Image: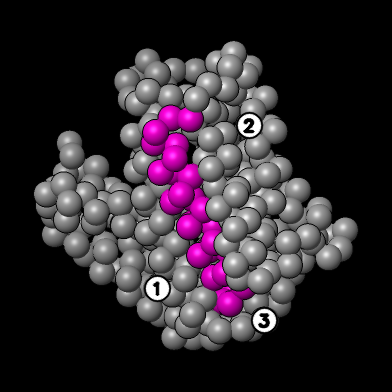
Amino acid sequence: MTDAALDGPRWRPLAALLGGACIIGLSAIFVRLADTGAAAAGFWRLVFATPLLALMTVRTTGAIGRPPKMALLAGLFFALDLGFWHYGIHYTSVANATVLSNLTPVVVTTFAWIFLKQRPGWLFSLAVAAALGGAWLMAIEKGGGRLVNQPLGDALSAVTALWYALYFLAMAEGRKTEGASRLMLWVSIVGAPLMLVAALLLGEPILPGSLVGWAACLGLGLMHVTGQGSIAWAMGRLPTSTASVVVLIQPVVAAYLGWLLFAEAIGPLQALGAVITLGGVILAQWASRQRTR
């Protein structure tokens, strides 16, 4: 990004980025309150987001158009991302599910190392070890609140980082020729029926069982549009280094709300593991940028 692109008041995009990250941090709470199946909650998230994304696409491009090829892949990966993460939230704590799913930056760079032959330096390798070590510390200590099956939930949340990394790579490729709102729209159109089929096959209740559940599902849709939209807008106006660090406030917000709403106490090992994991992610991003330069 050039210096010219960064001209103007920096507090506006920074505030949008911080606000978007905090909004996304609410998603785990809404999933817990949705009063429906885990995959069904993902279905309603995309269903409620679709009309708003369609309006945004028409306003920015004038027409919805045909689905971009990369949007089909991105929709598949995002559906897997939501399914694994929502079940992770169901089985483990909100804090663990959110922090472990934020291993995505490490996964992306590791993917580039293995498949694109972009070998990382020693500093990045140290960062990966730190992130994985922190995740292990989080997994070995049980927290308070409702923990149905913490090892399974932690594993599902960690795999979520893989699916989101593939979604991220597909979206990055699609953004070379398509606008963000159109891609997000088609991801929702592709992902929603996949989530519905998964919910039906798993025998989940599709309709929320209460007004609070319906409100939570609507909140997921609004959060999907406003949170992701704010982050996308801000990243076009701030250095990537700033954006990549600020959005890591999501696990902090989720952990605090999990403690406040669901009595999910954060033990000393979990707190230390969360700090080490996020520190490893930040260090991995920084090391990757330094090597690129």
- Residue 110 position, x and y percent, is 24, 56
Q: Measuring 40% from the left and 80% from the top, which residue is drawn there?
A: 137
| Residue bearing mark 1 | 135
Query: Residue at the location (64% across, 28% down)?
Result: 54
Residue depicted at 67% across the width and 58% down the height? 41
Which of the marked residues, 3 or 2, is nearer the chain's N terminus? 2
Q: Decide which of tag 1 and tag 2 comes sooner along the chain.
A: 2
Amino acid type, residue under disc 2 in the picture: Leu
On-image quarter of the N terminus: top left
Work out which quarter of the rendered image holds the C terminus and state it. top left
Q: Check the image and report above or below for 177 versus 70.
A: above
The kind of secondary structure element at disc 1 is helix
Label placed on residue 146 = 3
Judge whether 104 appears above or below 17 on screen.
below
Q: How many marks?
A: 3
What are the residue bounds of the magenta stretch?
67-94
In the picture, measured across the screen, residue 71 lies left or right of residue 186, that is: left
82 falls in the magenta region: yes
Helix, strand or loop for the magenta stretch, by majority: helix
**Looking at the image, which residue is at 55% across and 47% down?**
191
CB under 8 Å between callouts 3 and 2? no
Image spot of residue 265 (x, y percent):
63, 79
Counting from the top left corner in percent of width and height, residue 102 is at 44, 58
Q: CA distance from mark 3 to mark 2?
A: 34 Å
Question: Which numbered tag is attached to residue 53?
Answer: 2
Question: Between residues 1 and 27, which one lies in front from this camera angle?
Answer: 27
Q: Earlier in the sequence, mark 1 or mark 3?
A: 1
Q: Looking at the image, which is closer to me, 107 or 268?
A: 107
